[in-house]
Amino acid sequence: MQESSRIRRLPPYLFAQIEERIAEAVKSGRDVISLGIGDPDLPTPPRAVEALAEAAILPGNHRYPSSAGLLEFRQAVADWYRTRFGVELDPKTEITTLIGSKEGIANLPLCFVENGDISLVPDPGYPVYTSGTLLAGGEVYNLPLLEENSFLPDFAAVPAEVLRRTKLLWLNYPNNPTGAVAGREFFERAVAWAREHQILICHDAAYSEIAFDGFRPPSILEVDGAKDAAIAALSEPVASDLIAVYQQRRDLVVEQLSALGWNVAPPKAGIYIWAPVPSGYSSLEFAEHVFEQTNVVITPGVGYGRHGDGYFCISICLPAERIAAAFQRWETQGIRFA
């Protein structure tokens, strides 16, 4: 039976392909170090695990919850937003509960996008912004995130004919995959621009609590009027000891890349390092070369969009000793930037 047209519109999902490639290599006996996918390896804080275990044995929790989620949980989210960002949210009308932020990202366009409507999607960016839009019958207009603009979109470059059909604008800061951050001034400009053009801003803030060097990522909801134009993908606060581990790994990756000829600024937040590929390679070619020579997986930037070509992405979701081992393999095989 033939797939539906909406499924045929979807581009291949890069991360599924990477997972298949890793599984095949491991099955053949290769020692693969995967720096490609941002899958956190640090354990969930013990108190959260204990609370989950306690809740699992209560008979009252074996029934269906409200479709909006427990009010007590939504109140806890509201309390967290008040403490973290100084933002007041109504737990009854302005917060909902999801299986995960990916569910919200994929399904949100179904609520607002009609056939032929446009979503403004960052390029490079998380692929689900595109797939969610296409499944809803919408069209994607890519906003280039360029290094010379600090990987922030240029709203003024969006054509007027595109703006007339645009319903959604996706923003993701701290950014996956570039590691870029956005300050309050940027969010103020984004909100003003979106209000002018009647566009809903969707701020995916999944990495807001993984930040380094004293930087505190803001929320778009801190901007006056943002709640008339914005939703947020919520995340749980991350303990300071976990942040210290991620920062150590970030510094290690930047140090190792520097020793091999790269000039990469340490990102201020997130779990990714975004770096240029050496001259003479596309991002796919370089990722393939690295894998074949060293059994180390990196993500080619083109998997995040056309403007990601020429870059690769490294995740810091592995222990420091495995990260160091990966770069030792690079050095042994002569993989350098210059």
Image: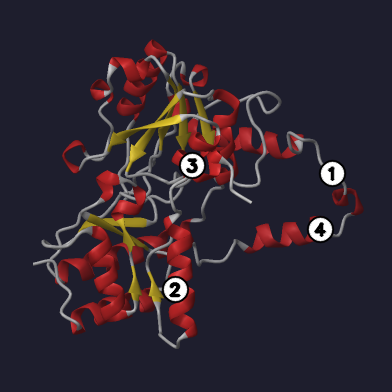
* Residue 274 position within the rendered picture, expressed as x and y whole percent measured from the top left: 27, 55
Residue drawn where x is 44% and y is 53% of the image:
12
User: Which residue bears the numbered disc 2?
Assistant: 22
Q: Residue furthest right?
A: 59
Along the polypeptide, which appears first: circle 4 or circle 2?
2
Residue named by callout 1: 64
Q: Residue at x 48, y 20 (%)?
A: 229
Compare marks 4 and 1 and give the one earlier in the sequence. Answer: 4
Provide the residue designation for mark 3: 131
Task: Out of 199 and 72, give the one closest to the viewer.
Answer: 199
Choose mark 3 or mark 4, whichever is in front: 3
User: Which of label 3 and label 1 is nearer to you?
Assistant: 3
**Spatial CA span between label 2 and label 3:** 23 Å
Nearer to us of marks 1 and 2 is 2
Residue at screen point 44% across, 19% down: 199
Name the N-terminal-most of marks 3 and 4: 4
Q: In front here: 134 or 153? A: 134
